[in-house]
Amino acid sequence: MLPRFTACLIALAILATSSYGFAEQKLVDVLFARDVVDREPVAPFEPGAYCEKEAEPSGPLPVIDSTKERRVFFWNLIESSVAGILRHTWYRGDAKVAEVDLMVGVSPNWRIWSSKKIVPKAHAGRWKVLISTVEEAGEVICVAHFMVK
């Protein structure tokens, strides 16, 4: 009886410490910024970014002037109790233009970011970045939109 009980306790301990997907990671903040220095966003674009689950935005979008800016950074603050990978997928309209896998470590303040070069006038239009998991068949966590003029 004791070996069976011990085996059950070990199995429960393994299940309790195992982690799957985004359940142990919380997206705390997202920003579109002009740069990232020392893991912090510099000069965020206005209005501020926000996360949605929908493909279409429901509010005002951050606007990037392509005659003044040459790069946009998408910065995220994550509270994470497990290590994993999140993916940023950049779209201009409906066309995928970049996909970046980013490591997430264990931390109450883990920061990740990716960036996209902006070509004046050529990249004008509506953009979006999807944050998704890699481990769970690409579950979309957030859709953040911005506009390039």
Image: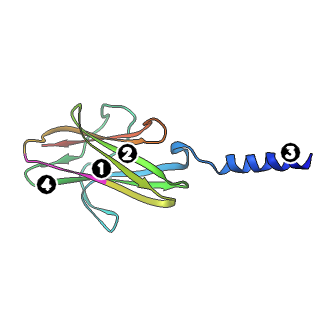
The residue carrying pointer 3 sits among few (fewer than 14), some (14 to 19) or many (20 or more) residues within 10 Å by Cα, namely few
| Residue at 34% over, 45% down | 88
The mark closer to the camera, 3 or 4, is 3
Residue where numbered disc 2 is placed: 87
Quadrant containing the N terminus is top right
Label 3: element kind: helix
Q: Is residue 117 magenta?
A: yes
Whichever of labels 1 and 2 marks the residue nearer the N terminus, that label is: 1
Residue where numbered disc 1 is placed: 48
Total tally of numbered discs in the picture: 4
Residue where numbered disc 3 is placed: 4
Label 2: element kind: strand
Dots 4, 2 in contact, CB < 8 A: no
The residue carrying pointer 1 sits among few (fewer than 14), some (14 to 19) or many (20 or more) residues within 10 Å by Cα, namely some
Three-letter amino acid code of the residue under disc 1? Gly
Three-letter amino acid code of the residue under disc 2? Arg
Three-letter amino acid code of the residue under disc 4? Glu
Gap between marks 2 and 3 measured at Cα: 42 Å
Whichever of labels 4 and 1 marks the residue nearer the N terminus, that label is: 1
Residue where numbered disc 4 is placed: 69
Label 4: element kind: loop
